[in-house]
Image (cartoon, rainbow, N blue to C red):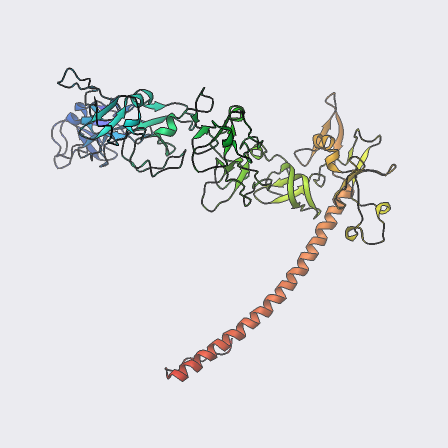
Amino acid sequence: MEIQHVIHEHPLSLIQSGIEHFMCHACERFLSGPTYECEECRISFHKSCLDEHKPEVQNFFHPCPLVLSTASGYKCYVCSERIRSGFCYKCKFSCHFQMHVKCALKPVVEYSDDKNTDTIQHFTHLHPLKPVDWNQQDEVVCNICRNLCSSSSSTTYLCMECKFFLHSSCMNSIPPRFINHRIHPCTLVFLIYPKYYRCDKCDDYETNRYGPFFSCGKCDFYLDVKCAVLPTIDSKDAEEVQHFSHPHPLVLIRHHEEYGKETRCAACVETCLAPTPTFRCSRSCNHFFLHKSCGLKFPYQPLKIDHPFHPKHGLAITSLPYNDHTRACGACCRGFDSSLIAYSCPVYDCSFNLHLDCTKLLPSFVFSGHSHLLTLFEKTPNFTCHLCGVNCNHFILRCVPCNFNIHLQCFPTAPSTIKHKSHLHSLILTKSPFKYELNSDEEAYNSDDEFYCDVCEEKRNKRELVYYCADCKFIAELKCVISTVLPLTPKSDSFEIIGEDNIVTEKAKPSKEIRNWHIEHVEQKLVRLGEREHELKAELEKVEGERKDVIVEIDMARVLLATLKGDPPLDQEFEL
């Protein structure tokens, strides 16, 4: 006869009498009488040990089912005493909760002998609690909310044995678990086990020393009670709230002078002015402000993400320090204005940050010369195009992990000919400047001549490719015709333009002229890099020769010093 019991992962076989010199894996006594045995693991249990206890129970102190298990030697999460018996009950899921068998079977409610006193049992404490009156001068705090009992109008309950105080308001407002909490998507379970932990919301651990908390065992996530029960920003008439964008509680500004002169909303970066309802950080972040309307409209982002822009580590949402000019977005390399919300890498010494807008950009362009997909960025600081060697600021195809950048117009399959509303004729992609634009005979790239776009009539970068009509000498830079170029730019190295009737109207091919120009540029770059490598090699040989001369002089100085001191002679090796 075999059974499957929660105490062991393999089937257990019933035998009439176990091997006497073996011990029961539960009670640690020698086997005798009927025994359950696992042949694979060679462990045995008294049948009476397993029959005596229920395989699974539901206990008042923990919302999840508890299953029978062999004791691990750790402390009971309820009474805080070490589990020394052979059995214990552990959480069936991932809460890491465990308790004595005697604590699990303890009656839910115990009544006092004094019928005039209401004695109750609450899941926040093992022992019964009684309402109590005390000297208002005594500074005792509620063990749950950590506020003074004397400062609350709520009735206070006390366990005299443990000196445990509990507001009746806390007793009624705190649930045994949270499901789909705004701060953490998994179920959070209330635990009273004395554990030194750090709250993953407010990052506080000094005030949480051995206090009760909410936990997600699967994610190793901890939340103190105050952060767990604090209202969210969409709560009506709440003056202290929590928001996913900031680690600390936010308080509603009550007076106009609290707005200050340079207060900007962390979400919209607009100035915060009265009487617009605005929240501010209740702690040390003096420059963190958030419009209530922005907090409501702002999408609830996931707290942690994995993003292809930073494949090494996951990113966590946070609010960056005010006016921290050393931080920049690792994708677009633009800075963060005011106290903007961003995704940051939590790994120590990894300073990667990401704009919320940049998280929406995903790699989608294939470049045959690169192993990763490229992402289109509309605006960035100065990058160098790896194909043409020119600085680029607008509409860049970029591989963030490799810092590999290409002008959109340099992309091999960018449309070589377009029709744009700004000009009657077709425009052809070509390099600039043109001879008729030059005011001198100097080489075009070294001249100081100014060049303009005929669409916006503003200065353009003379080294960037442009769209050009040779008949009319009409010049359009990319940013002025991007609405036409972008839809025609494929997300692979070969594509077909499909007409209105789903008929292939044109086979798009890279411009031969532009491709030859890129080839010539890369060849020239290789020549320059080869010459520089030769120069560095010569310099390295010279430095290596000087290093050898210094080593010889060091050895000679050591021999001379030993002679002057009368020390034993040293081996003299002056040649290298």
Image coordinates of residue 439 in percent, x first then y, are: 85, 49
Q: Quadrant of residue 51?
A: top left
- Seen at 58% across and 45% down, the residue is 402
* 468, above or below 165, in the image: below
523 or 294, which lies in front?
294
Q: Is residue 131 left or right of residue 229?
A: left
- Seen at 20% across and 29% down, the residue is 100
Can you say which quadrant of the picture contains the N terminus? top left
Q: Quadrant of residue 436?
A: top right
Whether residue 63 is visible, yes or no, is no
254 or 52, which lies in front?
254
Q: Is residue 539 left or right of residue 486?
A: left
- Seen at 39% across and 33% down, the residue is 219
* 567, above or below 444, in the image: below
Q: Is residue 126 left or right of residue 191?
A: left
**Residue most extreme to the right:** 471
Total labels: the figure holds 0
Image coordinates of residue 60 in percent, x first then y, are: 25, 21
Image coordinates of residue 362 in percent, x first then y, are: 58, 34
Image coordinates of residue 21 in percent, x first then y, are: 12, 37
Whether residue 3 is visible, yes or no, is yes
140 or 73, which lies in front?
140
**Residue most extreme to the top:** 115
* 123, above or below 437, in the image: above
- Seen at 71% across and 41% down, the residue is 410
